[in-house]
């Protein structure tokens, strides 16, 4: 590769087309609430939804961060299943933000191409209406990560992010925020402190207890409101539930 090519800025991402994103069906089998709605697994995400919603008796709009101690515990999958379960409530509008700027997954799980999103929106280069894309699931929209910025943590911790979350609460009943694992970056804790609540995903029988405890301590030390845990990866009943805290 020539030096000139290496120095070239990457081509900007396209702007998402709402009419196209609405037509792409959800096909991933792990997105059980959409693809296997009658299964026990889907029902467990509805139970998690009910627990979270029960903590919000006045029905005020809520921002909820989803994180875990380690990568691969099922955060992105759980975020979308929870979003689908929330959107099953009559008239509910849910937005999923992919704030895992290191390993984004939400667009991919929907089978959608990468497009401009959160980073362009926060840096003032894209209006909100173009950054948010509807999906084929009624009531669920997504805000993808956009182009990876030079300093993801700085962007996510900015006052613009805080203001954005306030604005989004005027438009959606729930805003779910998918984040990186809490043991390698502070992004989840920073966002957790801004959000109304945090759900910690734990892969059963895999994640050491000490990592989960470390994650909860990091979240709480910055002022996050822990709503509960979502257990994944077990065949036993109650694999997605709120923990008794
Ligand atoms: N409840 C679950 N049970 C079993 N496997 C799961 C579950 N949730 C997710 N997975 C699988 O685990 C892998 C990681 O999931 P993902 O949601 O991308 O994790 P993370 O966002 O925490 O990195 C994927 O292959 C996904 O299909
Ligand atoms: Mg993920």
Image (cartoon, rainbow, N blue to C red):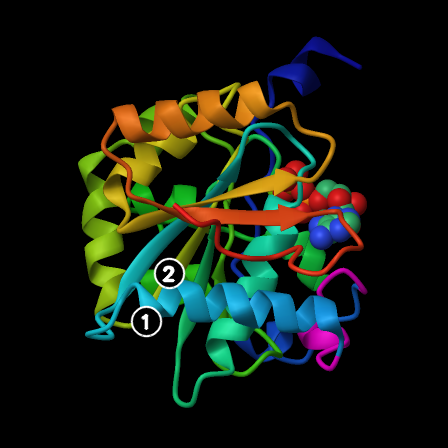
Q: Is residue 136 above or below residue 122?
A: below
Q: Rounded to the nearest whole Å, what is the CA distance between mark 2 and mark 1?
A: 6 Å
* Mark 2 crowdedness (10 Å alpha carbons): few <14, some 14-19, many ≥20: many
On-image quarter of the N terminus:
top right
Residue 155: horizontal and vertical position, in percent? 33, 31
- In this view of the protein, can residue 24 be seen by the observer? no
Identify residue for label 2: 175
Residue occupying the point 39% across, 63% down:
52
Q: Is residue 59 above or below residue 104?
A: below
Identify residue for label 1: 172
Toward which corner of the image does residue 61 lie, by quadrant?
bottom left
Label 2 with label 1: CB-CB less than 8 Å: yes
Magenta span dominant secondary structure: loop
Residue 217: horizontal and vertical position, in percent? 37, 24
Residue occupying the point 46% across, 42% down:
99
Which of the two residues, 32 or 238, is positioned nearer the viewer here? 238
Secondary element at tag 2: strand
Specify the segment rendered in magenta.
29-38
Within the magenta stretch, is there residue 211?
no
Most distant residue in the bottom direction: 90
Residue 72: horizontal and vertical position, in percent? 69, 36
- In this view of the protein, can residue 224 be seen by the observer? yes
On-image quarter of the C terminus:
top left
């Amino acid at each position: 590769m020539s030096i000139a090519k290496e120095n070239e800025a990457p081509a900007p991402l396209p702007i998402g087309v709402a009419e196209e994103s609405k037509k792409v069906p959800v096909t991933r089998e792990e997105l059980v609430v959409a693809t296997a709605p009658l299964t026990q697994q889907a029902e467990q995400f509805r139970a998690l939804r009910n627990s979270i919603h029960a903590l919000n008796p006045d029905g005020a709009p809520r921002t909820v961060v989803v994180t875990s101690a380690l990568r691969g515990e099922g955060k992105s999958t759980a975020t979308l299943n929870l979003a689908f379960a929330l959107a099953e409530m009559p008239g509910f509008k849910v937005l999923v933000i992919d704030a895992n700027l290191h390993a984004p997954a939400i667009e991919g799980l929907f089978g959608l191409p990468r497009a401009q999103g959160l980073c362009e929106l926060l840096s003032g280069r894209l209006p909100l209406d173009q950054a948010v894309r509807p999906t084929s699931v009624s009531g669920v929209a997504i805000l993808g990560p956009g182009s990876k910025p030079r300093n993801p943590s700085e962007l996510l911790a900015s006052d613009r992010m805080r203001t954005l979350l306030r604005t989004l609460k005027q438009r959606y009943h729930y805003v779910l925020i998918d984040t990186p694992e809490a043991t390698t970056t502070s992004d989840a804790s920073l966002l957790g402190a801004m959000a109304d609540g945090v759900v910690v995903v734990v892969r059963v029988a895999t994640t050491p207890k000490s990592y989960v405890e470390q994650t909860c301590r990091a979240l709480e030390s910055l002022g996050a409101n822990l709503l509960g845990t979502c257990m994944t990866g077990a065949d036993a009943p109650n694999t997605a539930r709120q923990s008794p805290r």
